Image (cartoon, rainbow, N blue to C red):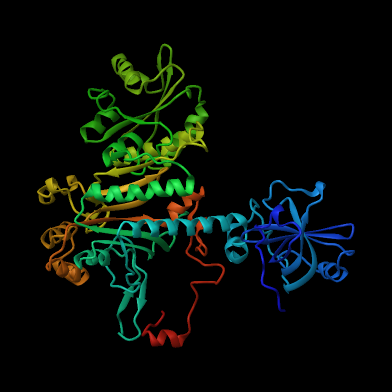
Amino acid sequence: MQFKRRTHTCGELRESKIGERVVLNGWVDSRRDLGGVIFIDLRDRYGITQVVFEPAFNKEAHELAKKLRSEFVISVEGVVRNRPEDTLNPNLPTGMIDVKVDKLIILNEAVTPPFQIKDNIDVNEDLRLKYRYLDLRRSKMQKNLLLRHKVYQIVRRYFDENNFVEVETPMLMKSTPEGARDFLVPSRLHKGKFYALPQSPQTYKQILMVAGYDRYFQITKCFRDEDLRADRQPEFTQIDVEMSFVDVEDVFEIVEGLMKKLFKEVWNKELELPLPRLSFNEAMEKYGSDKPDLRFELEMVKLNDVFANSEFRVFNNTIEEGGIITGLLAKGCGDYTRNQLDVLTNFVKKLGAGGLIWMRVREDGLEAPVAKFFSEEEKQALIKQMNAEAGDLIFIISGQWNKALTIMGNLRLEMAKRMNLIKEDAEPSLLWVTDFPLLEWDDETQRFYAMHHPFTSPRVEDIPLMDSEPAKVRARAYDLVLNGNEIAGGSIRIHDSKLQSKMFEVLGISKEEAEEKFGFLMNAFKYGAPPHGGIAFGFDRMVMLFAGENSIREVMAFPKTSSGLSLMDDSPSTVSEEQLKELHIKLR
């Protein structure tokens, strides 16, 4: 049915428009019939306006309004008036007025939705994802997607103002070993061959630097066929950035400028620059994480010196094997019951700890099952090192450096929740973590893997160690961490083909494999590659944090479930035998 073009949106009308004739289009949010007068809350993405049907004003429109139900799509025409005193709604921007309707057109009827289109209703997430088109009508979801749009625009303006060129890179590319499993796309024209969807545009952006584009950025889709979690999706969005003739400080300056702008325009907060920095080792030893949450002060303490000469066999063995003894002080928790302590012990055991040592701090010393194994000198040194007082509780974990610290880092977060240390109004914590190891050893495969990716440059002074002690080589890599979440990671890249070959060698990638997978990049380097570096932001995660959400699915229009399914359109799905035949594929 024909309808008139709207004159205003449903969030626009105010008292200044009283007496004007208007046309509104939208969805029926709610309907109330009060003694023959029908009140409809009309909704679009801009807001809600109350419209009123009175039989004395227009009988035909009133009669038709009796058919209206939730989510009908309608067009109304009428006059703006003051709301009666007893119906004013100060919680709505349009709450001082309503529209007295004399013309109604029902544009589309709607069946009863499977859940109410309201915020803060308890609906199973799978149901929300199956009917995502309804879920996206909710105010909260619309605010999240509008925030996402706003961040897109801020990012694009910022990089354009700073002389960056936006270049689109291919979605169909060569499969390369970059850490995660590729999504593969079979080629119909080239039998038995496959494209890969990009895990990131890493090789392309480096080639753009070789090509002389100097400053590149792109907001792009990336794909990884990996096990999923709440903050992971098989397809995700990345802000990709690369710059030529730069060092770490240049990258930091550009990124910090962007974050300052986002903090101001999204949160209306002034971000103090430069951002604090922690080395990887500092972050691990103080917070048990390479993405530490610094919104609260709970710090871990290294205790190797306190127990350097301990006769306690567990600590003695840890120190001899080059491990770490790490402590955590829970202020005022000395009254924890044995049951509470057993729950925490089970918590760390599930993470792989052999056990958890706890000690209550009393006026007369330490109370704990293991206290008898320590000398009085060690006990006093421990209290001093932990800065403990009577009424406090000390936790100690010992073992291999990375494992023990990671477990204690998880206990730190658990205790922060129990002690209510993370306040809703806490100032955001944004920092750099730097000096990551270049490589990490995998016991299962008995080989090194790149901690970031194989194009990350080692620190110049550590290059000689690549042959003798590769585990000690530090990378020119950095992560940006917001409220305990890594939101960006990058590095200065290798731009010399000989050093890149050495990196492949350390990673156990043969010359033949390197040539097959990365020959095009290595060849490009031979034609004059500038020093370059960059960073990539996890856009979905960043928007999630700005929106105050706990899952990236809340800031994506059409996400997959945690098992990679799209419930709305039922994908992935089977395809016809003819399609498979065209692609030279046979299913077993």
Q: Residue at x 17, y 48 (%)?
A: 459
Q: Is residue 19 left or right of residue 235?
A: right
Query: Closest to the observer: 152 or 448?
Result: 152
Which percent across, then down, holds residue 271?
Answer: 40, 41
Q: Is residue 42 above or below residue 187?
A: above
Query: Closest to the observer: 462 or 529?
Result: 529
Using the rendered image of the protein, determine whether residue 224 is visible from the camera's viewpoint: no
* Image-quadrant location for residue 315: top left
Q: Is residue 541 left or right of residue 321?
A: right
Q: What quarter of the picture does the N terminus occupy?
A: bottom right
Which percent across, then down, holds residue 318?
Answer: 26, 33
Which percent across, then down, holds residue 204?
Answer: 26, 67
Query: Closest to the observer: 443 or 151?
Result: 151
Using the rendered image of the protein, determine whether residue 16 is visible from the camera's viewpoint: yes
Q: Residue at x 10, y 51 (%)?
A: 467
Q: Is residue 345 left or right of residue 112?
A: left
Q: Is residue 150 above or below residue 198?
A: above
